[in-house]
Amino acid sequence: MPANPTAAAAFQKLHTGPDVLILPNAWDAASARVVENAGAKAIATSSAAVAWSHGYADGHDLPIARLVTAIEEIARVVHLPLSADAEGGYADDPAVVGENIAALIAAGAVGINLEDGRDTPELHCAKIAAARDAASRAGVALYINARTDVYLKKLVPAEAAVAETITRGRAAKDAGASGLFVPGLVAPSDIAAIVAAVDLPLNLLAWPGAPSLADLKRLKVRRLSAGTAIVNVALAAVRTASEALLQKGDSAALLAAAGAPVNYNALMKREG
């Protein structure tokens, strides 16, 4: 189900405020449909969660074809704008990154995350430009969320983190980015400085010490992502239930823990 301009425009608008766009990241069609049913305004994947669900580690281990298929499956069942976490584009060559992003757009994505990791800012920007070019050729106003790992991976000394993030954010905007994603950023003073200096909607990650939703709104943060938090909750529940059943074989306790049955068959039947 190829991306469409209407969904792309809707996704862009969700970043304009005044509310913070909250994204409980999904990893497959079922989790995405449940997230949609829970009241989300858009669907975004977690690269780690998608990789784990296919038996791969995060960090470009997942074959791009598997990600494309996952996006196709999600797009088939949900009605919301869909953003794909594309890690670093699954290639070092910006031209190949452009091809990969084109495939994700064709699968139904109207947004992507594209991270720098330990790449140079110049390579990151070249990948962003390639993604923007691919989107232009596809006729889709792709939301490119430029992720920088300055805080997450401590790419520079702490005292230089704000300045480095601002420099990278401005360069990303010039390369064609739509938003700036800074995982690990939590200090209100740092958030305020970056929002003031970089003319892009700021996306933060659910993180220990992160400001409250009211404070995020006051600081003009536009997006909050769950990252791997939702899949970690889900996998923890799988382990807890499995261990309890293996240890006690108690069917009644297992069914009680599952709660009221949900008609997932009905939930997966997309109408319209």
Image (cartoon, helix red, strand yellow):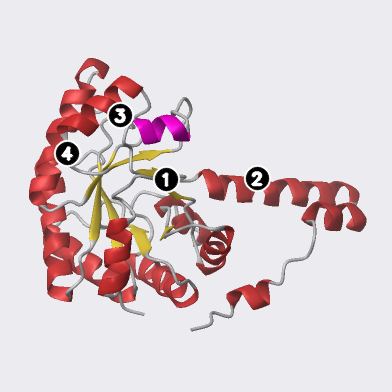
Q: Quadrant of the N terminus?
A: bottom left
Q: CA distance from mark 4 to mark 3?
A: 13 Å
From the image, give the main secondary structure of the stretch colored magenta.
Answer: helix
Say which element carries label 3. loop
**Three-letter code for the amino acid on which mark 1 is drawn:** Ser
Q: CA distance from mark 1 to mark 2?
A: 19 Å
Whether residue 95 appears in this view of the structure is yes
**3 or 1: tag closer to the N-terminus:** 3
Which residue is pictured at 84% across the width and 55% down the height?
Answer: 254
Q: Which residue is mark 1?
A: 225
Labels 4 & 2 near each other (Cβ < 8 A):
no
**Three-letter code for the amino acid on which mark 2 is drawn:** Ala
Q: Residue furthest bottom?
A: 272
Q: CA distance from mark 3 to mark 1?
A: 16 Å
Labels 3 & 1 near each other (Cβ < 8 A):
no
> Residue 17: horizontal and vertical position, in percent?
33, 47
Q: For residue 196: magenta?
A: no
Labels 1 & 2 near each other (Cβ < 8 A):
no
Q: Which residue is mark 4?
A: 169
Say which element carries label 2. helix
Q: CA distance from mark 4 to mark 1?
A: 18 Å
**4 or 2: tag closer to the N-terminus:** 4
The part of the chain drawn in magenta is 213-218
Which residue is pictured at 78% across the width and 65% down the height?
Answer: 261
Closer to viewer: mark 4 or mark 3: 4
**Three-letter code for the amino acid on which mark 3 is drawn:** Tyr
Q: For residue 217: magenta?
A: yes
Q: Which residue is mark 2?
A: 236
> Residue 96: horizontal and vertical position, in percent?
17, 64
